[in-house]
Image (tube, rainbow, N blue to C red):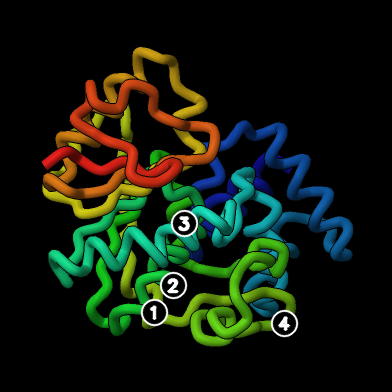
Amino acid sequence: MEQDYRLFIEKVKRKTGIDLSLYKETQMKRRLTSLYQKKGFHSFQEFFQGMERDRELLYAFLDRMTINVSEFYRNRKRWDVLEEKIIPRLLSKNRNLKIWSAACSTGEEPYTIAMVLSNFLPLSEIKILATDLDENAIQKAKIGAYQERSLQEVPEQMKRKIFFKDQNHYLIHEEVKRTVTFKKHNLLADPFDKNFDLIVCRNVLIYFTEEAKNSLYKKFSASLKPGGVLFVGSTEQIFNASQYKLEPIETFFYQKIE
């Protein structure tokens, strides 16, 4: 059994870039064993061979091993504000926007940014940096296969434009994937790039101490251009934004003071 699982880990890493050894072995093994038994397999090797033959099985594996649960257009009304008010304001100054999705998880957030921008710019002109600490989440984001429940808030017209259906999953079109560059990055330890027009960091800071939040708001502010915008999550309102050289312009949107 041990050898069976170790070999499975190696093969999965070669196939997908995902490293199962980074997860707690007992829990992950239990989750995946219940999945392969449900699908009628008797070992990890049999299961991997099944995944080689059947893409839907591969997607089922990706869903089971990913702990992060996210969705496109999370808190839809905020994305409407981004589309109707923030993006037009930023584009009026500069069409070549520099954008960062910080803590992007399995890719729903940066791909949503690409969807919003695709209403204003051709996909070939859209460039988004997306970073996360979790290498496996990044690998899953690069594969770009999602269950229907993640797409509940996606407008129907956008769903047709951005995704194609493969059995029970929705896959991101290659030209949309090319708008996003994924990288591993530790918000608390790694340096930040500069001169961003827009930084999106939502539903992450709630997990940090007040001291860490304070440090991150300073770093985000320093990374924005004057007039650049920070978009935070719906539980992450910034009080005393002016101490970070930021000012609220819409609920959960803060502009760097010029």
Tell which tag, 2 or 4, sits nearer the viewer: 2
Specify the label residue 119 is tagged with: 1
What is the x, y in percent for residue 110?
Answer: 41, 60
The disc labelled 1 sits on which kind of residue? Asn
Pick the quarter of the image with the C terminus.
top left
Say which of 192 and 237 sits in front.
237
Pointers 4 and 1 in contact (CB under 8 A)? no
Q: Position of residue 106 (x, y in %)?
A: 51, 54
Dot 3 corresponds to which residue? 109
User: Along the polypeptide, which appears first: circle 2 or circle 3?
Assistant: 3
- Cα separation, mark 1 vs mark 2, equals 7 Å
Q: Above or below — where is 10 with respect to 51?
A: above
Number of other residues with Cα within 10 Å of mark 3, as a class: few under 14, some 14 to 19, many 20 or more: many
Q: Nearer the viewer, mark 1 or mark 2?
A: 1
Query: Tag 2: Cα neighbours inside 10 Å, few (<14), some, or many (≥20)?
Result: many
Q: Amino acid at mark 4?
A: Gln
Q: CA distance from mark 2 to mark 3?
A: 10 Å
The numbered mark at residue 167 is 4
Q: Quadrant of residue 171?
A: bottom right
Q: Which residue is mark 2?
A: 115
User: Who comes first in sequence, dot 2 or dot 4?
Assistant: 2
Disc on the earlier residue, 4 or 1: 1
